[in-house]
Image (cartoon, rainbow, N blue to C red):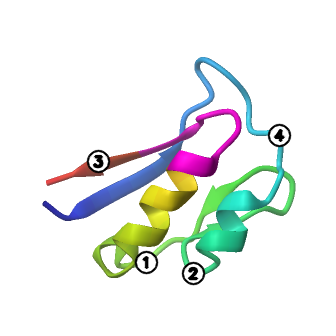
Amino acid sequence: MAIVKVWLDETEDECISCGSCEAVAPMVFEVPDKMIVIEGVDFSLYEDEIKEAVDICPTSVIKFETD
């Protein structure tokens, strides 16, 4: 099952802009002020990195969807 969507979900908590997601997956995430997902990325190429970013996010605001 491939990752088809990645987003920032701040319904429970807020991004603290720690940069950990960008450190493990700079091809998917940027953290100028708050984390953003880079547009046009083929998420299926970076599934391990995305899952690691989700696991290490201190506020658990990174979410993803599989097909």
- Among numbered discs 3 and 4, the one appearing first in the sequence: 4
Report the residue marked by disc 1: 41
The answer to whether residue 64 is left or right of residue 44 is right
Q: Amino acid at mark 4?
A: Ile
The percent coordinates of residue 51 (x first, y second) are 43, 57
Between the C-alphas of marks 3 and 2, the distance is 18 Å
Viewer-closest of 4 and 55: 55
Q: Nearer the viewer, mark 4 or mark 1?
A: 4
View extreme (top): residue: 12
- Disc 3 target residue: 65
In magenta stretch: residue 48: no
Q: Is residue 52 above or below residue 49?
A: above
Q: Label 3's element?
A: strand
Judged left or right of residue 21, residue 32 is right
Q: Amino acid at mark 2?
A: Met
Distance from the alpha carbon under mark 3 to that under mark 1: 14 Å
Q: Quadrant of the C terminus?
A: bottom left
The circle drawn on residue 16 is 4
Q: Are marks 1 and 2 in contact (CB under 8 Å)?
A: yes
Which amino acid type is marked by label 1? Val
Query: What segment is highlighted magenta in the picture?
Result: 55-63
Please provide percent x and percent y for residue 3. Answer: 27, 61
